Image (cartoon, rainbow, N blue to C red):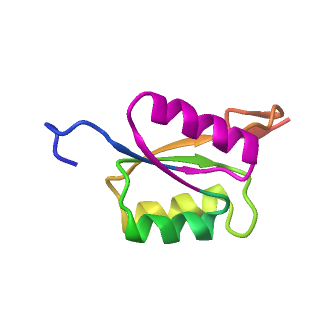
Amino acid sequence: MDATRRMKRILVVEDDEAMCKHLQELLVHFGFEVRSASDGNAGLNVLKGWPPDLVILDVFLPEKDGFEMLLELRGDYPRLKVLVITGKEHLIFGRSI
């Protein structure tokens, strides 16, 4: 991404429909162009045809989970910014307790 260009496109990969809708509405409100996918495979498909500036990626997804998708993103798009999120309360600093 050109440093002089503001971030405009965000891909939200989230399987919780309500959370996805909330994130989309919030991001659109602040002027971002947003697309979404409900699993890692669908997210990768969206990304191929619509390159985002940022991916907001849930960890726990059906089909291909967030960790698997992140590994593919790092291999194919090493400079892409990714924000990894989870709603699981029992995960602290990458450790299950």
Q: Is the residue 44 above or below the residue 84 in the image?
A: below
Horizontal and vertical percent position of residue 94: 69, 40
Horizontal and vertical percent position of residue 68: 61, 64
Query: Where the C terminus falls, by quadrant?
Result: top right
| Residue 93 magenta-highlighted | no
In the rendered view, does 74 fall on the left or right side of 16?
left
For the residue pair 15 and 21, the one nearer the viewer reads as 21
Task: Give the residue displayed 39% in from the left and 70% down from the top.
Answer: 49
Horizontal and vertical percent position of residue 18: 74, 41
Task: Give the residue displayed 62% in from the left and 64% down from the top.
Answer: 40
Q: Is the residue 26 above or below the residue 44 in the image?
A: above
Q: Which residues are magenta?
A: 12-36
Q: Is the residue 20 above or below the residue 79 in the image?
A: above
In the rendered view, does 10 fall on the left or right side of 12?
left
In the rendered view, does 39 fall on the left or right side of 52?
right
In which quarter of the view is residue 84 placed? top right
For the residue pair 97 and 22, the one nearer the viewer reads as 22
Horizontal and vertical percent position of residue 60: 74, 52
In which quarter of the view is residue 88 placed? top right
Task: Give the residue displayed 63% in from the left and 56% down from the top.
Answer: 66
For the residue pair 95 and 20, the one nearer the viewer reads as 20
Task: Give the residue displayed 75% in from the left and 39% down from the top.
Answer: 95
| Residue 33 magenta-highlighted | yes
